[in-house]
Amino acid sequence: MIRTTMTPPRLGASLTAVSLAACAAVTGCSRPDNAPGPMEETDHSVMRTGQASDYDIKAALNEVIRGVETDFEDYEIRAGVAVADSTGAVQVGLRGEEPTWSTVKVPIAIAALRDGASSDLVDLAIKESDNDAAYALWSHVGWNEGDAGQAVKKLLAEYDSRGELEEPFGYSTWLLKDQAVFGSHLPCIPEAEYVYEVMDQIVAWQDNGLDKLPDTRAKGGWGLSEEDNSYTHRQLGVRDTGSGGSVGLAIEVTMPGVSAEQAIPALNVLAAGVDRVVTEALDAGTLKPVEECEPKPTSATSSVSSAATATGARSSVTMTSGASSSTASTRTSVR
């Protein structure tokens, strides 16, 4: 059951470098295509930026991307960013075609809470990026909805976001643009109240990038490709505008696996640059935060069957970050 002690209206990032073998199992490793995306892509969802001011958010974000890639040129780092407001999304750099890794735990947790999953599992899956807990949430959704991937995909679609869910779920495809759009609506999703809350309580060693910014909460995901040994670190975030509105954010950096230790420094620089641009765009009136929370249909099932399943899910998972069962050996420790 969702905790009821939080304020309802508008609601108040794990691997250093794991072995290839560990990367091949459950939380989310599909074989990614890590080819760098175009430096700039325009589509039907690009923001209408000329209406309120002449501030060119796309050009400003491109400058941030170029700065990061130049600063970390020796490590072959590439970067991507998407920012979404109530009018659409703007995306520059990499598109986010790499695996979602643990960023997909956010909609999985929301879908599971719809079906009455335990908030204790959400604590572990989001705050600590615990893979066993996330797998239990995924299984909970599958038990209640029949197909966990389709249920999460449906949830994304309700908030104008698209994704292709895979199993293992960390290998899912969820482009930065679609992540940012979903993030912009996150405070408005009724079942997301607790998820939104704990995204601001990430454990210290994962507290980096977007999550370190003021008025921003985020969930990270990172992993090493078993196909080409490339490393990706990405984050899904929400910027609270301080006036009852929200802006969705999604960022990523990629690099050869040997440079993985540079991921967090690069992510921090990228996040700081994005924060500056978003602040300037908000001040200029270019960004129009999502402020109106319209009711959305849900797929919640009966609380009786959900509670029973939640109990079963909890019994199959230990409340630690380490693998603890025979099924854990078939899943990856990638976050």
Image (spheres, rainbow, N blue to C red):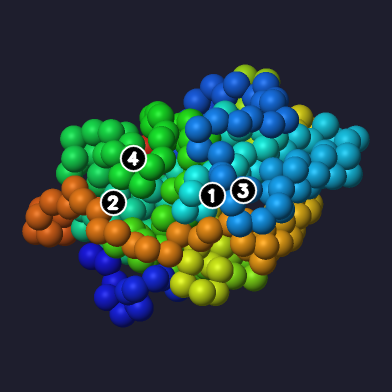
Q: Nearer the viewer, mark 1 or mark 4?
A: 1
Circle 3 SS class: loop
> Is residue 148 rendered to the left or right of residue 175?
left
Residue occupied by mark 4: 157
In the picture provided, is 56 more to the left or to the right than 318?
A: right
Q: What is the CA distance from the residue labelled 1 to the residue labelled 3?
A: 12 Å
How far apart, in angstroms, are the residues tagged by discs 2 and 1? 25 Å
Q: Earlier in the sequence, mark 3 or mark 2?
A: 3
Mark 4 Cα shell of 10 Å, populated few (<14), some (14-19), many (≥20): some
Q: Quadrant where the N terminus lies? A: bottom left
The structure residue drawn at horizontal position 19% and vertical position 40%, both measured from the top left corner, is 145
Q: Is residue 315 visible?
A: no
Residue 319 position within the rendered picture, expressed as x and y whole percent measured from the top left: 40, 60
- Answer above or below: position of 304 versus 145: below
Q: CA distance from mark 1 to mark 4?
A: 15 Å
Q: Earlier in the sequence, mark 3 or mark 4?
A: 3
Dot 1 corresponds to which residue? 84
Q: Position of residue 32 (x, y in %)?
A: 57, 24
The residue at 48%/67% (across/down) is 245
User: Looking at the image, do the residues carrying marks 3 and 4 touch, with CB atoms under 8 Å apart?
Assistant: no
Q: Amino acid at mark 3?
A: Thr
Please state which amino acid type lies under the numbered disc 2: Ala
The residue at which mark 3 appears reads as 49
